[in-house]
Amino acid sequence: MLGRAAAASLDALQTMAKTVLAKATRARSPTVHDVHSHLAEWKTIYDVLDATADPVAFHAHALALEDAYSRDASTINFAARVHQLHPIAFAQDTAMRRPPTSLQSMLSHCPHCGASIAPTTAFRVHMQQAAAACHACHGRYDYETYKLVAYIDAHPFCATSTTVVVDTPSLPHDGSWDTFLARQTAAIRATRPSQDAYNDAQMTRRRHMLASIRRGLNPAISLDLVHGMFRQLRFLETIGREIDYWSDPAVLRASIERYERFMALTSPSPLVPTVDIDLVWHAHLTQPKRYAHLERTSALWQHAYNEPYTRPSAVAAEGTPVTETSASRWGTVLVPYDTTALVSRILQSTAPSRTPQPPIEGASGDHGIYLHDSDLAFQYQRRAAAEESNDSSDSGNDGCSGCSGD
C-alpha cells in the first residue's frame, strides 16, 4: 500500500492532470459544411479526370498542376491538396521553402543534353520506372538518373583531406548510379588518401547520396506530388462517380461520426481508413490549424463499438456511408519507386576500407600515414548511423559539398 505522503503526491498529480485536460482545446472535427466544400473541389478535379482520354494525358496535366503549385505556394489545386495530406512534410516544406524546380521542367528534358522528351516517354520513365534513350544524344536514363543529376549538381566536389579536393564525375552516358559510383570511388582512390581520410570521404558520400535519393526531385517539395496525385485516383473516382450520394447530409453526418471513432482508435500503429472516413480525413487535413492527431487506444473497432468496421456497399443502410472504394481506370499505371536496390548499392560502394592502402613510395605527410586500428570500421558505422538519422535536408559543409542548402 502507498504511504500517506505518496498517496497525497499521487492525488496532486491526478488533480493537475484533470485540470490540464479540462483546459485543453479538443480538436474539432470537420462539419458537414466543411466536407461539402471539400467535395466541391474533388468534383472539379474528377470532372477533369473523367474528360481525360488516357493516363499519359493526365500525367501531363498533373505535371502542370505541380508546376503551378511549385511556382506559387498559395495556389490551391490538386497538387496542393495532396501535399496537405502529408501534414509533417507539408509543415516542413512550408517552413523551409527552398527555390523550386518543378517536375515538369525536369522530366520534359533529357538529363544529359536537355533535348525535349515526348510526353509518352516522360510518363513511362516517371510513372513506370522504365529506361529510355535520348533521340538527340543517345544517352540512357531512367527516374534514378534524375536523382543522380540532383546529387551531382548539389555536390560538385568531394574533399578527401584538408588539402585534397576531388571533382565529382560528370553524368555517365548510361545514366547509371553504378557507373558513377565506380568512377567517383576510383577518383578518390587516385589521390592516395590515408585510410581514415578515405573512410571519412566514404561516410560523407553515403550520407549525401542517401539524402538525395530520399527527397523529391523538386527541392521545394519533399514529396513527388505527381506520384501522390495518381495514388489518389482510386479515391477520387469513388467519390466523383457518386457525388450526389456523398453530398447527402445524412451520409456525411454518419461519415463524420465514424471518422471521430476512427481517430479515437488511431495509435502509433495506424489503422487503415475506409472511404467514408478517408473523405472526412481529407477535408480535415486541408485545415492544418484545426487538425490534430488524437492518440488513444488501439482496441479493435468491433470490440469497442460492437459493429463491423467495413460494410459492403450493396447492403449499406440508409444514412450509413459506403465504406469501400471502387475500381480505378488507371489504378495500376503507377509503379511505386522503390529505393531499396539503389540504397543497397550505395551502401556497398561507400563501405569503409578495412585494409590499409599500400603507401606510395617516397610519399610523406598525411598521405603516407595509414591506420591499422581494428575498431575503425565499427567507429565508421556508428558515426554514419548517427549522421544518417539526422534530417535528410541538413547537409552541412563537411567534405562532399557545394550547396549549403542540401
Image: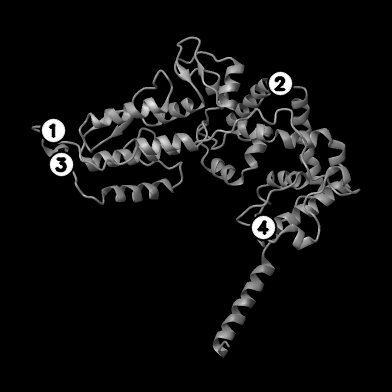
Residue, disc 3: 369
Q: Give the CA separation, mark 3 to mark 1.
A: 10 Å
Residue that carries the numbered disc 4 in the rendered image: 294
* Residue at the farthest bottom position: 4
Circle 1 — which element? loop
The span from disc 4 to disc 2 (Cα, nearest Å) is 40 Å
**Disc 2 residue type?**
Asp
Question: Mark 2 and mark 3: span between their CA atoms?
Answer: 62 Å
Closer to viewer: mark 4 or mark 1:
1
The amino acid type, in three-letter code, at marker 3 is Ile
Closer to us: 360 or 46? 360
Give the residue pinned by disc 2: 54
Q: Position of residue 317 (x, y in %)?
A: 90, 49
Mark 2, Cα crowd under 10 Å, few <14 / some 14-19 / many 20+, is few
User: Can residue 204 be seen at all in this image of the molecule?
Assistant: yes
Q: In which quadrant of the rendered view does residue 346 lie?
A: top left
40 shown above or below 250? above
Nearer-N-terminus badge (4/1): 4
**Residue 219 placement (x, y as % from top left):** 50, 33
132 and 252: which one is in front? 132
Q: Which residue is mark 1?
A: 360
Above/below status of 8 relative to 174:
below
At a point 45% along the width and 42% down the height, the residue shown is 392
Q: Are marks 4 and 2 in contact (CB under 8 Å)?
A: no
Q: Position of residue 280 (x, y in %)?
A: 75, 47
Quadrant for the C terminus in the image: top left
Please rate how many residues cluster around mark 3, counting C-alpha atoms within 10 Å: few if below 14, some from 14 to 19, many from 20: some
Name the kind of residue labelled 1 in the image.
Answer: Ile
Could you tell me if residue 168 is visible in this image? no
